[in-house]
Image (tube, rainbow, N blue to C red):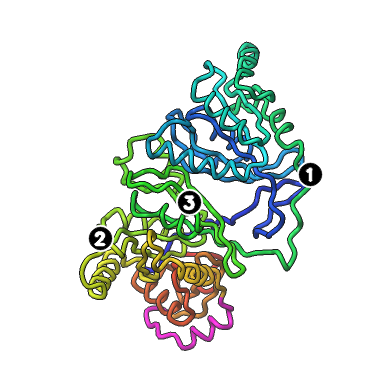
Amino acid sequence: MSLVSTQQTESLRHVGSASCPAIIKIHMSNAIPTVVIVGRPNVGKSTLFNRITGQRRAIVGDEPGITRDRIHGQAEHDGRHFELIDTGGIVVEDQEYIPAQILHQADMALRKASHIIFLVDGRGEITGSDRDLARMLIKLGKPVSLAVNKVDTQERENLAHEFYGLGIPDIFPVSAEHGIGVDALLDRVTAGFPAGCPDEPTEENLTKVIKVAIIGRPNVGKSTLLNTLTGQERAIVSPIAGTTRDAVDEQVSRDGVEYVFVDTAGIRRKGKTRDMAEKLSVVMARRHIRMAHVVLLILDATEGVVGLDATIAGYAHEGGRALIICVNKWDEVKGQKGQKKREFEQEIRDEFKFLDYAPLVFISARSGAGVQPLFKLIRECYDSASRRITTGELNRFVEHLKFEERKIFYITQHSIRPPAFAVFVDRGGPLHFSHQRHLANQIRRQFGFRGTPILIETRAKGAAGKR
């Protein structure tokens, strides 16, 4: 099936202001300063991150340990632009797998930090975890500001002075939820940062951006694929389903194109998601699907196609996203690879009849087999979804079109991503579904549009709008 409901397409933008307007494309310029927020679990790091960036980028909740991977955002304070990184809650001596991986992710962020915001909970006493983390940060020798969070009354502000015992002289009482004290904190954090807008883009440094969402069920290898595509340990990988909660993104430059890969949380069935954090993860994952240009749907070759795979694919299809089906863990499949591949491909085409336009690739995210050609395929699908066909070309197409169901006078393309066409016919009323599908296939056969759904709208000749 090649038809989708009309959707508003969203563009990838930088954070902008009146004096420094947002731009649609990323330009390659000198790196801006980086600020990293660290602290033990559930002290309000994600709330502070969202407050500073002005976006609901990180998931916020009362459950400790919601953020696990590091989350990046762009921010500005008093004309000074910087990158902000939210890290998972750190417990320095915790040797369990997930906490240890959170510490590893935070350590990679701290290496590039220009300034560190150490966030503690002002409603309680200093803990052993706070002291361990303070010692670790002091040893780094980088500028550190201690933000005492959840201080929204004068009484609590007076208690903030007790945190001088952590050995960090720059202390700022704040309330991340209400924004109290955040400006004073940022005055200190950005004091040495260069003022003014980032360099204006030129023809030499302007780069096209393709945003790619990696989606699928829990534990099919999405985070492993992100790490292989980016060439670094960007996301925590574990056999525990649901390890990724926030969407994790990373930029990769390849042949003059900037790819922004977003690893989304594994999407579960309704009713199967009990934790608040996992429910929010599903909502955020669907949001990132809508914001993407291209979607990679990851299937598990060792488990075959399941019903939930089709449901998840439907989210991307209904949103009008270009889509590539990636069968992961192909190296773990036993038996004759050629025969198995044909059987698997037939099963996918039977189950996903509405994705007949989507390319199908077999990969191993763990070994890297088949991963690098994805860059070229993503670019091809993006270009297809962005393609515009002139009215003249479409009129010549109509002259040779073999279509007997209704008289078609002419066709125009009125939008992209997904490509949407208005078909002007002899009388009102939409084409039958099967006829729309046939027409979409004819358009695809003539003009390409590989990897993208096509939207068909029927209009009566001379009518002001759709009938």
Position of residue 68 measured from the top left corner of the image (x, y, whole percent): 46, 40
For disc 2, the marked residue is 304
Outermost residue on the top side: it is: 155
Amino acid under disc 3: Glu
Q: Nearer the viewer, mark 1 or mark 3?
A: 3
Q: Position of residue 48 (x, y in %)?
A: 59, 33
- Distance of label 3 from label 2 (alpha carbons): 27 Å
Q: Was residue 63 drawn as part of the magenta stretch in this picture?
A: no
From the image, tell me which residue sits under label 1: 195
The label nearer to you, 3 versus 2, is 3
Asked whether residue 420 is in view, the answer is no
Residue 249 drawn at (x, y percent): 52, 51
Whether pointer 1 and pointer 3 mark residues with C-beta atoms closer than 8 Å, the reply is no
Per the image, is 393 magenta?
yes
Circle 3 Cα neighbour tier, 10 Å, few/some/many (<14 / 14–19 / ≥20): some
Is residue 418 placed above or below 176 in the rendered structure? below
Residue at image mark 3? 233
